[in-house]
Image: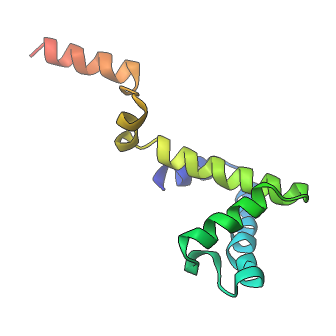
Amino acid sequence: MRAAERFLEGQEETVRVKLGVLLKVFEWGALLFFGRRFTRLPAAKQDLYMRAWELSRVRTFRFGFSSLRNLALLAFYTQPESWPMIGYPGPVLESENRQSAIGNS
């Protein structure tokens, strides 16, 4: 989550406030449909709830889902531990610097 936090630190206050509202609506909105907040739902119901947001007729819900998904992807794929899963060797400049350091040893 540090990547998401770093990203949000660079955003305007209004963006951070809106994201906070979105997270609360998403979390507690599940209560209306499943009788529990999102983080207390079993995985299958979480998937169903997220799918409902993703495919909603209401554009605001679809946009909210997309925003949360993109933030989650940012947080996950900026972690070096995730890179081997997608065949990414890491930043080129960082790799070149490591190679130079190894060659100069």
Which residue is located at x 31 percent, y 15 percent?
Answer: 96
> Between 69 and 55, which is closer to the camera in this rendering?
55
Q: Quadrant of residue 60?
A: bottom right
Q: Quadrant of residue 27?
A: bottom right
- Residue 33: x percent and y percent? 76, 80
Position of residue 53 relative to residue 25, above or below, is above
As drawn, which residue projects farthest toward the left? 105
Q: Quadrant of residue 85?
A: top left
As drawn, which residue projects farthest toward the bottom? 35
Quadrant placement of the C terminus: top left
> Between 71 and 43, which is closer to the camera in this rendering?
43
- Residue 43: x percent and y percent? 54, 70
Which residue is located at x 70 percent, y 68 percent?
Answer: 49
- Residue 30: x percent and y percent? 71, 77
- Residue 91: x percent and y percent? 40, 25
Which residue is located at x 67 percent, y 55 percent?
Answer: 68
State the scheme by which the image is colored. rainbow
Asked whether the viewer can see residue 77, the reply is yes
Asked whether the viewer can see residue 12, the reply is no
Q: Taking 56 as reference, is 36 left or right?
A: left
Position of residue 91 relative to residue 27, above or below, is above
> Between 92 and 39, which is closer to the camera in this rendering?
39
Which residue is located at x 19 percent, y 18 percent?
Answer: 101
Q: Taking 89 as reference, is 28 left or right?
A: right
